[in-house]
Amino acid sequence: MKFNKILFPVDFSEASPKIVPYVKEMAKKFDSEIHILYVARTFQNFVSSYVPHSSADLFDNAAVEGGKKNIEEFAEQHFKGSDKIIIKVVNGYEAEEIINYIEKEKIELLIMGTHGRKGIDKLIFGSVAEKVTKATPIPIMLINPYKIKE
């Protein structure tokens, strides 16, 4: 089994850097291309009332531009010297966009963190990892960044 393309979705929380060593190790082992993906939430994710398109578009564009800046800094800081890095920012719903990216780019392994949300947080926000796991046919490595022994 060889994984030519690994997807690493990031959210720029304190959890993302904790997963980096696992991504690097798997990429090294299989000489894989690493795709780092950030999904910027659209304005519609946050509101349930009507907002004029121009305002929503401004918000979405700002979220994508901020995401591009952050993902470039993240890749530079954590993957400096790696020559098989692809970074991408899209906007939408996290689980849906991760699944779309896997299909579009023919990703062969997904490595992502879990946030371990419980109670009302899980009810409100759901679990991106859970939704992706149920919907994608590729192997997935889930890492709970808060349980890693350093």
Image (tube, rainbow, N blue to C red):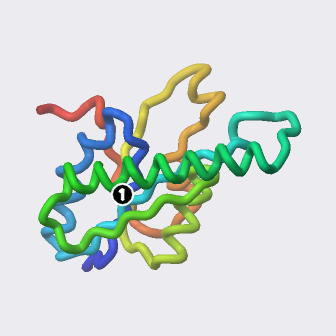
Which residue, as the protein is rendered here, is positioned at the far top? Answer: 120
Picture quadrant of residue 113: top left
- Give left or right: position of 33 versus 104: left
In-image side of 50 versus 137 (left or right)? right
Q: Is residue 19 above or below residue 118?
A: below
**Residue 108, position as x, y percentages in the image:** 38, 73
Res. 123 image quadrant: top right
Task: Give amino acid for label 1.
Answer: Phe
Horizontal and vertical percent for residue 102?
Answer: 49, 69
Which residue is under mark 1?
Answer: 8
Q: Position of residue 105 (x, y in %)?
A: 47, 77
Residue at left 42%, top 73%? 107
Quadrant of res 47: top right
| Disc 1: CA contacts within 10 A as few (<14), some (14-19) or many (>=20) | many
Q: Quadrant where the N terminus lies? A: bottom left
Quadrant where the C terminus is found in the figure:
top left
Residue 70: give x, y in percent of width and height: 37, 47
Count the numbered circles shown. 1
Question: Which residue appears at 41% of the width and 40% of the height?
Answer: 114
Against 80, residue 62 (above or below) is: above
Question: Which element type, helix, strand or loop, lies under badge 1?
Answer: strand
Q: Nearer the viewer, residue 139 or 12?
A: 12
Q: Residue at x 44, y 69 (%)?
A: 138
Left or right: 36, with 44 as reference point: left
Near-viewer residue (94 or 128): 94
